[in-house]
Every structure is written in C-alpha cells, then in structure tokens.
Image: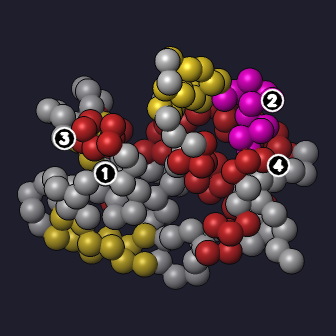
Amino acid sequence: MDVRRSPSQMGLLSEVFRRGKGVRRSLSPTHPLLAWGHRAEEFLVGHDEALVPFGPQSPFGRLLEWNGKILTIDAPFSTVTFTHFLEDRIAQTLPVPLYEPEPMEGTVIDYEGVARKVPVKVLSATANRLRRDDLLEAELLKEGVLKRRRVGNTRLGLLDCRAMTEVVDHMVATGRHFFDSPQ
C-alpha cells in the first residue's frame, strides 16, 4: 500500500476525501484510515505498529476513546470496519479463532517513499464465514444505536462508537454473539 497513491477501497467518496488537501492516511497495510484536522496525526499514529489493525492501540480504539461517530452514505452496514474492533474486544468469547494463527506481512510505502514491511494479523477465513452482520445490525437498530435516514435518494446511517461497544458488551454478557457456531 502506497500511502500517497494507492486508491481507497471504500468507494468514491473516501477516494475524493483521500485526495483532499491536508488529509492524512494511516500506514496499515490492510485497513488504512483517513483523517483530516488538527488531531489527524494523533489519531493515526502507530497504526503500522499495531499487530492487530483493529486493536485497542489502533485508530479504531481511538474512535471509542474519543467518542467517535460513524456516518455511512449509501453503504451497507457490513462495510462498517469498526465492527472488527468490536470483534477483537470479544475475541476470547468467540467459538472460533478471530485471526489466522500467523501474522502476514504487508508492504507499506510511507510518506517519504520508503517501503517498509509491516506484520499484521488478518481475520480468519472461518471467522469471516461465520460472522453475521445482520444479527449485529438488527440489535443496533433495536437499541436505537443505528439511526437511518434518507436525504432524497441517499441513504444515511449514523452510529455512535461508544454505544455500539456497549451493545456488543451487553450481547456477550447475556450469552449472545453475532457469529454462527461452527458445525
């Protein structure tokens, strides 16, 4: 991933944002995030050093810490990457390993043009197959944490990271998950 040139994989809007003046990008080889503003560097720092790209030391952890909000625009719930942070929080309670046993290595070309090898844990094929985004989405809708609106033909979704985390923590505490059991 070339932090300056690799296009966003999350759609046209994020690609236009990525190209904007003053926008910064994290150095994760698998799940880079974009940020703009006076705290952008502070938000993104160390993402390349986080073996787990969604862990508590990643920008995804800062979304919770900083009481972040997520706005989706014409995007399905399954594209909300913050759910992987929630999965990481509950990984020990899942019926299958969340990550593949061995880290993979990605190459990141940083802002100075230097290529660096970055180890990263990737989600397991089994966890990806058993994940049920629809169950989490339904729970978030029921609890009023996922708010949906339309503006003309545009579908918007608004999520509060702290409230999402509380819903998932409560689900797990009451013996519920958004993963199927392996058969």
> Which of the labelled discs sits on residue 142, or is there none?
2
Residue 117 at what x, y percent from top left?
27, 74
Residue 115 or residue 129, whichever sits in front: 129
Residue 95 x, y percent position in the rendering: 80, 69
- Span shown in magenta: 136-146
The residue singled out by tag 1 in the image is 8
Marks 4 and 3 close (CB-CB < 8 Å): no
Q: Is residue 54 visible?
A: yes
Q: Main secondary structure of the magenta part?
A: helix
| Residue sitting nearer the eye, 67 or 19 | 19
Determine crowd level at label 2: few under 14, some 14-19, many 20+ residues with C-alpha closer than 10 A.
few
Marks 3,2: beta carbons within 8 A: no
User: Which quadrant of the structure image shows residue 59?
Assistant: top left
State which mark lies toward you, 4 or 3.
3
Residue picked out by circle 4: 172
The secondary element bearing badge 3 is classed as loop
Q: In the rendered structure, which amino acid carries the disc numbered 1?
A: Ser
